[in-house]
Amino acid sequence: MVDKPWIELGLTDGEYSLIVGQLGREPNLVELNMYSVMWSEHCSYKHSRAELRKFPTEGPRVLQGPGENAGVVDIGEGWACAFKIESHNHPSAVEPYQGAATGVGGILRDIFTMGARPVAFLNSLRFGELSDPRVRYLFDRVVAGIGGYGNCVGIPTVAGEVYFEPCYRGNPLVNAMCVGVMRSENLVLGKASGEGNLVFLAGARTGKDGIHGVTFASEELNAASEEKRPSVQVGDPFMGKLLMEATLELIEKGLAAGVQDLGGAGLTCALTETAARAGTGIEVDLDQVPLREEGMLAHEILVSESQERMLYIIEPRHREEVEKIFIRWGLPYANLGRVTTDGMVRALFRGEKVVNLPAASVAGGAPECEPGLAEPAYYGELKKFKLPELPGETNYNRALQKLLGDSTVASKEAVWRRYDYSVRTSTLQGPGGDAAVIRIRENGKALALTVDGNGRHSYLDPYIGGIYAVAEATRNLSCTGAEPVGITDCLNFGNPEKAEISWQFQQTVEGMSEACRVLGVPVVGGNVSFYNEVEGEAIYPTPVVGAVGLLAEPENMTRSAFKSAGDHVLLLGSKLVSLGGSQYLKCCHNVVAGALTRPDLELEKRLQELLRSLINERLVHSAHDLSEGGLAVALAECCIGGELGCVLTLPAGSGRADNLFGEGPSRVIVSVHYELVGRVVRLAGKAKVPVMDLGEVGGEKLKIMSEGEYLVDIKIADLDRIYREVIACAMK
């Protein structure tokens, strides 16, 4: 007998005392397991709740904000969009294929739980350096898992990003996003409302996979983590497809009073959260749960995270029709019990009452931690780095080639070729652009979708890094002509019990919140992933922003590639750049240091408004955001995409590395027909957005001149080869 079983389950002495105080008695072992999973960091957000309240979450289009399975925004004509991003980092570190696949399956269920038909997947991935065989293995299997699940359920994977940094070697990040479309009146919440309503469970049978998976996700990785492989769930995309179709049919026919996915913490989470949200209770008989394995104990049934399962709240008068739908779709199902009004969750097992807990205590009673805050020692030191002390670099051709061949910058075509990004035939722009664009046939509009984040920026300055993440995501939407309507975020950090990590988190959230307020974009949902550490070494603080934009006239959509010879290349936005924290500094000098360029959010707002206006008035042929690698890399990408060169001239005094490769926010390249240049320049002046005419599109080379000397002079075919080969070779 263990003296303190709660310690082995991940609870502290203080938390156990709090549980006893809330119950007025000691919990039994089954109840203790329920508290263990629901009071884990993964489920309770006890170290992040206070900070997350800083996010602006309301707006004219918001139909459902944070607190439900997914956020929902209005997209016009009675239609709405549901979207969410979540992490599956720890599972992917120990079992990359299933970790990634079940991450996709879990986020899929979050969307159709709301009543929305999923239309697109996106992903944001982080790994160590590709030279490491273990990293290549993780990379290959994660990509295979994402494609394996998404392709099987017939939903396109239309966009994503992949970064490679040493800090992610042992703790890769796998963040999955899903977007769905629905009739606004079909919105269903995860609430167990209505006394006497039936509680149904349908989908895959319950097994022992994933038991205490949320507890595993709420601790640092170490040498023993491989032994936790049984905590990783096993996905079944074909069952997921059946479950999706059955759920959507139930909702469209008005047969479901409430729906809840069984993800982290399994049945425990679904029962307690749905009851707590509705202020009701639930009583169930665990002997009715369809099992995959014999001899499962009560606590195993309650905390198992077996995939492809849903909980439904059904009015008794609909029971027969609901059961027919489950049977037609070939789903195991059971009526577990009913909704009560006393706020208690009760469970019977083999005729014995094994659970009698207040739903609000289990689902929302975890303490709200107030960790200490401390600025990391490295923060001030890295800011002192003097860029002029770098050795001179005069071969800018070589520097550009090195950047384009860097695994973070290089083309990810070899990745997205393993995904089906055109299934359902609604993809207007798939992977490789600033943002994906999906046609919404039901209302004639389109959605622009993107995921963005740069952990190195947030490591060097988490406040500015948070601003950058929101600004870049929304800017990428604006580069297609779409108006940003909402964001979801996945905040990946180290151990929040460390004051330095909590400081990084606080600063990041404050930066993101400020950007959202100025740009007028609400946060409608998201996920926090803490404890991303291996043997005490944390990843970079990595905020990932998933953003959705609305394109009222899809025919106006703009791509990033140069389109026509003779077009003029204009640089819109800020003139301020820095090599601090840049890809050039890391790639060409192996240095991660320096100060980031301070953002001007009012300029960012004006720039994005100008972009959308120019695009929707059809005054530009292309638009491309400047990010990693600065101006030179962005120009190379425009040339490669359009199979067209360009000849540009930078102003005198601009021939330094920072002007070619320096990075900073609020900068976009557009190409414009020569007859429209004057009009675009006037509109930019009216909008108070700086503009610079750099030169013309044409030829077979990227040529950048300053003060009569060519700084860059390279054939596009050579740049294309370098850009594509590194990831392709790694994935052979």
Image (cartoon, rainbow, N blue to C red):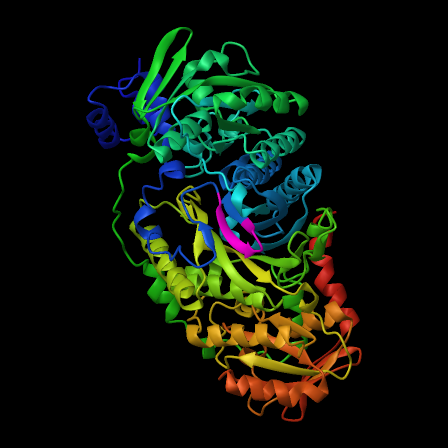
* Horizontal and vertical percent position of residue 485: 51, 60
For this orientation, the residue located farthest to the front is: 317
Give the image quarter of residue 504. bottom left
Does residue 142 show up?
yes
**476 left or right of 214 in image:** right
Q: Is residue 125 above or below residue 97?
A: below
Residue at 37% from the left image edge and 38% from the top image edge? 41
Residue at 51% from the left image edge and 86% from the top image edge? 686
* Horizontal and vertical percent position of residue 25: 21, 19
**652 left or right of 535 in image:** right
**405 left or right of 165 in image:** right
Give the image quarter of residue 36. top left
Tell me which segment is drawn in magenta: 70-81
* Magenta region, main secondary structure: strand
* Horizontal and vertical percent position of residue 721: 76, 64
Quadrant for the N terminus, please: top left
Q: Is residue 181 above or below residue 257?
A: below
Q: How many marks?
A: 0
Q: Is residue 319 above or below residue 134?
A: above
Q: Nearer the viewer, residue 367 or 358?
A: 358
* Horizontal and vertical percent position of residue 345: 35, 22
Q: Nearer the viewer, residue 539 or 60?
A: 60
For this orientation, the residue located farthest to the top is: 351
Residue at 48% from the left image edge and 21% from the top image edge? 316
